[in-house]
């Protein structure tokens, strides 16, 4: 998957996406990822959604909104820093319930293309929540605790209260 880093920041980015799609024949997967990232960006523009950054802390106890501020970044800017990769061949993607994964502090997000694309088509709000969930990890949020389901539930509560998820998502 060839989702460029600066999604939505100009025509060069669009050219890179087209080049990646043409080179790898992953148009459906790229389109699903772009839509989910664009939707996540729209949601994060809402102060109520950005409140999710105050709900979690990194391993040192700093709230994620403070991490963003220390980095001189916005939530939407953090989203731009993420690099999305096709993780289909990674062992974690063998679990049909896993749609994406990363490690705390990493900007590299691996999408389980088949599962993620299906999720984006069936429940786009949940796919957008997955992107925001992974963005929180990029800021240093770990898991267990909180569980993946708790993180995603909070993202959905803050960012999509009017939309009910069909069930817990796993990452």
Image (cartoon, rainbow, N blue to C red):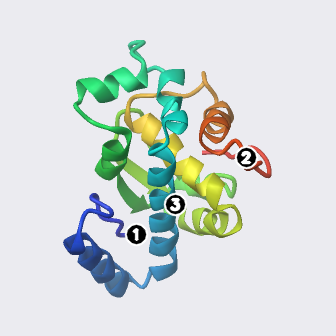
- Which residue is under mark 1? 1
- Which residue occupies 38% across, 40% down? 75
| Relative image position of residue 88 (x, y in whole percent) | 51, 64
Q: Quadrant of residue 1?
A: bottom left
Image point (34%, 87%), residue name: 22
Say which element carries label 3.
helix
Q: Are marks 1 and 2 in contact (CB under 8 Å)?
A: no
Mark 1–mark 3 contact, CB under 8 Å? no
Identify the image quadrant of the C terminus: top right
Check the image and report above or below for 169 versus 63: below
The residue under label 3 is: 36
Figure quadrant of residue 117 = bottom right
Q: Is residue 7 left or right of residue 129?
A: left
SS at mark 2 in the image: loop
> Which dot, 1 or 2, sits closer to the camera?
2
Disc 2 from disc 3: Cα separation: 18 Å
Residue lying at the far top of the rendered structure = 61
Q: Nearer the viewer, mark 1 or mark 3?
A: 3
* 80 relative to 54, above or below: below
Q: Which mark is residue 162?
A: 2
Left or right side of 95 for 131: left
- Label 1 to label 2: alpha-carbon separation: 31 Å
Image position, residue 7 (x, y; %):
32, 62
Asked whether the residues under the numbered discs 2 and 3 touch, taking CB atoms below 8 Å apart as contact, a structural biologist would say no
The location of residue 80, given as percent across then percent down, is: 31, 51
Labels 1 and 3: the sequence-earlier one = 1
């Amino acid at each position: 998957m060839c989702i460029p880093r600066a999604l939505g920041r100009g025509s060069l980015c669009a050219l890179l996406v087209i080049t990646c799609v043409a080179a790898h024949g992953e148009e459906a997967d790229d389109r699903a990822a772009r839509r989910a990232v664009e939707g996540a960006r729209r949601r994060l523009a809402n102060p109520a959604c950005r409140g999710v950054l105050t709900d979690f802390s990194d391993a040192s106890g700093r709230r994620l909104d403070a991490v963003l501020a220390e980095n001189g970044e916005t939530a939407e800017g953090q989203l731009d820093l993420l690099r999305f990769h096709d993780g289909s061949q990674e062992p974690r993607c063998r679990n049909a319930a896993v749609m994406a994964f990363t490690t705390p502090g990493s900007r590299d997000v691996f999408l389980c293309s088949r599962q993620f694309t299906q999720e984006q088509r069936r429940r786009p709000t949940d796919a957008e929540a997955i992107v925001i969930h992974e963005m929180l990890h990029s800021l240093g949020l770990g898991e267990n605790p909180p569980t993946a389901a708790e993180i995603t539930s909070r993202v959905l509560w803050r960012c999509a209260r009017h939309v009910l998820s069909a069930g817990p998502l796993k990452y």
